[in-house]
Image: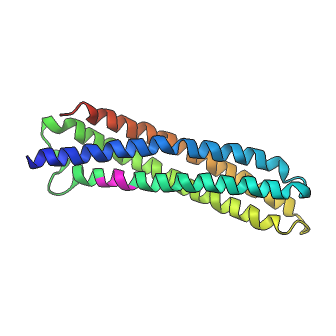
Amino acid sequence: MAAEAWRARFQERVVEAASRMERVQGHPAAAQGHLALAAPLLADNAAAAAARDRIQRVLGALGEASSDLAFAMSVMNGAKLLVFSDVIGIEQLGDQYFPEGNAGVVLHDAVEDVEEAFAMVDSCCSHLDAVLLLLDHPRLPGVDGLIQEELAAADGDLQAAIGNAELGTELAVGARQDVSGAN
C-alpha cells in the first residue's frame, strides 16, 4: 500500500511539472515579440518611452517564465527524490515500477535543461535592466552602442532560454507520458 501511495505522489509531481513547463512556453515567446518591437524604437530618443514600455513588458513576461521555471524545477526535483531516495533506490524498483524509474531518469535530464533556461532568463533580465539604465543617459558618448550590445546579449540569452525550455518541456512531457499508463 505504501508503494502505491509513493507512486501516486510521484505521478502527481510529474504531471504538475509537465503542465507547468507547457505553461512556460508562452512567456518567452511573448517576451521575444516585445523585444523585437523595442529594438527599432531605441534609435530615436523621442521613442525611448515606448521602448522602455516594451522592455518592461519583456521583463514582466520573463518574470512569469522565471516563476514557472522555478516551480517546475522544484516539482521535478521532488519527484526525483521520490524515485532516487535511499529508501527507494532506482535499483530497488521492481519491474512494475519501470515507468516511474524511467520517468525519474528523464526528469533528471529535464531539470538540467530547465536550470539552464532559468539562468538564461535571469541573464536576459540583467541585460534589459542595463538597457533601462542606459536609456536614462542618452547624451553619454557611445551609449547607443552600449544599448545595442546589451540588447543583442539579451536576445541571445532569450534564444538560449527558449531552446532550453523547449527541451525541458519535451522531456517533462515524455516523463508524464511514461507514467500516464503506469498503474
Which image quadrant is residue 174 in? top left
Q: Is residue 156 visible?
A: yes
**Residue 161, percent across and down?**
57, 48
**Quadrant in which residue 135 is drawn:** bottom right
Can you say which quadrant of the picture contains the C terminus?
top left
Q: Which residue does the image show at 15% across and 52% down from the upper left?
A: 88
Question: What stretch of residues is rendered in magenta?
Answer: 74-78
Residue 130's place in the image compared with 5, above or below, is below
Q: Which x, y percent locates residue 170?
A: 44, 36
Q: Nearer the viewer, residue 90 or 20?
A: 20
- Residue shown at 87% from the left, 54% from the top: 47
35 left or right of 97?
Answer: right
Q: How is the image coloured?
A: rainbow
Determine the residue positioned at 27% across, 38% down.
Answer: 102
Provide residue 8's location: percent of width, then percent of height. 21, 44
Q: State left or right for residue 43 relative to residue 33.
A: right
Viewer-closest of 67 and 174: 67
Task: Look at 91% across and 68% down and name the residue there.
Answer: 139
Magenta-drawn stretch contains 128: no
* Figure label count: 0
Q: Is residue 16 above or below residue 170?
A: below
